[in-house]
Amino acid sequence: MWKKLLVTDEKVWATIPLRIALGVIFLAHGGQKLFGWLGGKGLIGTSDFFALKLGLTPGMLWALLAGIGEFGGGLLLLMGLFTRLGALSIAIVMLVAILKVHGGAFFMPAGAEFAFSLFCSALALLIAGGGKFSLDAWLQKNER
């Protein structure tokens, strides 16, 4: 079972749209947290939000971890490089978001269903790996 979790099937196409969607979403969200891109608060604003509104202290540490997890995870998924590491990173961030931000409701406007769907998508990539057109598959093929 462990071997199956660690090796990607280079014939699987289904991971491509998941990697692209999650990669773009989390590059953007991580960029908002780390760099203030796309109207984000940047690292200082995010750390204040984490500490003051969510009770995650020290806020700077948690904001940095979330930003790196999202931005780095999104980048890894887009490239299909260390896909499982990127997916694990995103799954952890989404689990924290579900519990700390959306814990009181499942349905929108403040609900967890979107974060839950992102969490489950990340879990799917954690299980499947990068699949077709991933650097994981290319490296695996050239390792033989």
Image (tube, grey):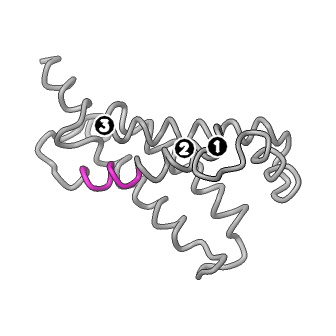
Is the N terminus in the top left, top right, bottom left or bottom right quadrant?
top left
Report the predominant secondary structure element of the magenta stretch.
helix
Residue 42 is situated, as x and y percent measured from the top left of the image, at 70, 42
- State the separation of the CA atoms marked 1 and 3: 20 Å
**Mark 2, residue position:** 70
> Label 1 to label 2, Cα distance in Å?
6 Å
Circles 1 and 2, Cβ within 8 Å, touching? The answer is yes
The residue at which mark 3 appears reads as 80
> Does 64 appear above or below 20?
above
Q: Quadrant of residue 17?
A: bottom left
- From the top left corner, tell me how far across and down residue 86 is, in percent: 44, 39
What amino acid type is highlighted by mark number 3?
A: Gly
Q: Which residue is mark 1?
A: 66
Q: Could you tell me which secondary element the residue under label 1 belongs to?
A: helix
Q: Tell me where residue 40 appears, x and y as whole percent.
A: 66, 50
Is 19 in the magenta? yes
- Residue 78, x across and y down, in percent: 34, 41
Q: Is residue 36 left or right of residue 58?
A: left
